[in-house]
Amino acid sequence: MRLATALHQGTTSLAQQDHCSSTPTARHPPLVATGDHRPYTAGWMTTTLLGVEHDRAGLYVLTRAESLALLSSVEHGRIAISSRSLPLILPVTFSVDHERILLATWDGSTLSAATDGNIVAFQADEPCADEPPAWSVSVTGLANHLPLEALPPELRMQSSHWGQVASVHGVEISTDVISGRRLPSGVVSSAGPARGDV
C-alpha cells in the first residue's frame, strides 16, 4: 500500500503541474489510470507481431507470469537501494516465493538499513559467462524485514556463517511493478544454440 500511495502521489503531482502550466503538454505521455501502477506502455513504445508484444528495440515484452517464472529460475540478482542519499547496487542471493523476492542480511548492515520499509529496485538476468543475457527482469517494490525463520531453507543455510558475527534476518520485496524483456525466439548466439525461449 505504501508503494501504491507513493506512486499515486507522484502522478497526482505531475498532473497538477501540467494543468497549471501555460505551455503545451503534448510532449508528456498520458498518466496511468488511478490504481494502475504498471509501467506506461503506449502504442508508440510497443508493437504486437503475430500476437506477441515487442518493444521498440525488437525485444519480446515478458508478461508478469513469465517474468516471475524466469526470476524463479535463478538465484543471483542485484538490489538497488539508497544509502546516505546516494544510489547503491549490491549483489544478492535470493529466491521467489508467492510473488515476493526473498533474501537474507544481517543487523547493522547497509542492506538492512535500506530495506526496512523502503522502496527498492531489483534486477536479475540470465546467467551467462561470455554472451549477453537472453532475458532481464526488473522489479520495483516495498522492502520489509522478516524473521530468519520465514526464509526458505536454502537461504537460511547460505547465511548460516553470518550468525557467528551478527544477527541475521530476512528481507521480502514486493513485486508491485515488474518489467521483463527477452531476446526474440530463435536468436542465435556465437556459441550456436538458439536463445530466448522461456
Image (cartoon, helix red, strand yellow):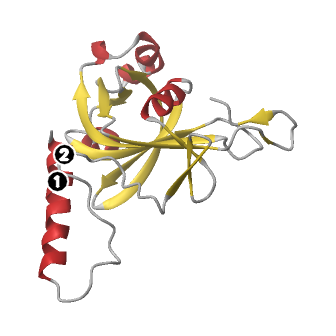
Query: Residue 99, image x and y in percent?
Result: 36, 25
Residue nearest the observer in this picture, 120 or 5: 5
| Position of residue 124 in the picture relative to residue 88 (left or right) | right
Q: Which mark is residue 84?
A: none
As shown in the figure, which amino acid type bears the numbered disc 1?
His
In the rendered image, the quadrant that contains the C terminus is top right
* SS at circle 2: loop
Residue located 66% across and 44% down the image: 183
Residue located 23% across and 30% down the image: 145
Residue 109 seen in this snapshot: no
As shown in the figure, which amino acid type bears the numbered disc 2?
Gly
* SS at circle 1: helix
Q: How many marks?
A: 2
Residue corresponding to mark 1? 8
Between disc 2 and disc 1, whose residue precedes? Answer: 1
Label 1 near label 2: C-beta < 8 Å? Answer: yes
Kindly indicate the quadrant of the structure image that contains residue 159.
top left
Q: Which mark is residue 35?
A: 2
- In the image, farthest residue toward the front: 50
